[in-house]
C-alpha cells in the first residue's frame, strides 16, 4: 500500500499542547503509522460520519478522517477518552 500524507488540523495541534509530555511521542508514533496503514486493526469508524475513524493510544483517542482518493489522513482531535466524544 502506498504511503498517505498526514495533515494536522489546528485543533489537533492545540490538543497536543494540553497532553502529558510523556504521552506525546507515543501518540505521534501512532499517527505516523497511519501513513502506512490508514485503517489499522482496532480502528473504529465513528457513527454518523462516512470517513471519520478513531484509534486508541492508551487513554487517548485520535480522531481522524481518511480520504483514499488523494491519500490524505487528516487528524482532527487528540483527546483523553473521557472528553473526546463530547
Image: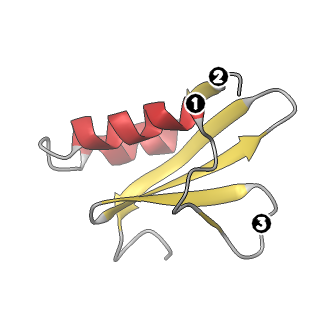
Query: Colour scheme in the image?
Result: secondary structure
Identity of the residue drawn at 40% across and 41% down: 30
How many residues crowd mark 1 within 10 Å: few (<14), some (14–19), many (20+)?
some
Spatial CA distance of label 1 from label 3 is: 22 Å
**Labels 1 and 3: the sequence-earlier one:** 1
Mark number, residue 36:
1
Q: The N terminus is located in which quarter?
A: top right
How many residues crowd mark 3 within 10 Å: few (<14), some (14–19), many (20+)?
few
Give residue 78's position: percent from left, percent from top: 41, 52
Spatial CA distance of label 1 from label 2 is: 5 Å
How many residues crowd mark 2 within 10 Å: few (<14), some (14–19), many (20+)?
few
Q: Is residue 8 visible?
A: no
Give residue 5's position: percent from left, percent from top: 64, 23
Identity of the residue drawn at 69% across and 57% down: 52
Q: Which residue is mark 2?
A: 3
Q: With respect to residue 58, does 48 lie above or below?
A: below
Q: With respect to residue 48, does 21 lie above or below?
A: above
**SS of the residue under disc 1:** helix
As drawn, is 19 to the left or to the right of 47?
left
Q: Which residue is mark 3?
A: 49
In depth, the one of 33 and 66 nearer the eye is 33
Q: Are marks 1 and 2 in contact (CB under 8 Å)?
A: yes
In depth, the one of 48 and 29 nearer the eye is 29
- Please identify, in this view, whether the residue under mark 3 or under mark 2 is nearer the observer: 2
Amino acid at each position: 500500500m502506498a504511503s498517505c500524507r498526514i495533515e494536522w488540523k489546528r485543533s489537533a495541534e492545540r490538543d497536543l499542547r494540553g497532553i502529558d509530555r510523556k504521552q506525546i511521542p507515543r501518540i505521534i508514533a501512532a499517527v505516523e503509522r497511519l501513513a502506512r496503514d490508514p485503517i489499522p486493526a482496532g480502528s473504529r469508524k465513528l457513527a454518523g460520519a462516512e470517513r471519520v475513524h478513531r484509534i486508541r493510544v492508551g487513554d487517548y483517542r485520535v480522531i481522524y478522517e481518511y480520504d483514499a482518493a488523494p491519500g490524505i489522513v487528516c487528524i482532527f482531535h487528540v483527546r483523553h477518552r473521557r472528553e473526546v466524544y463530547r
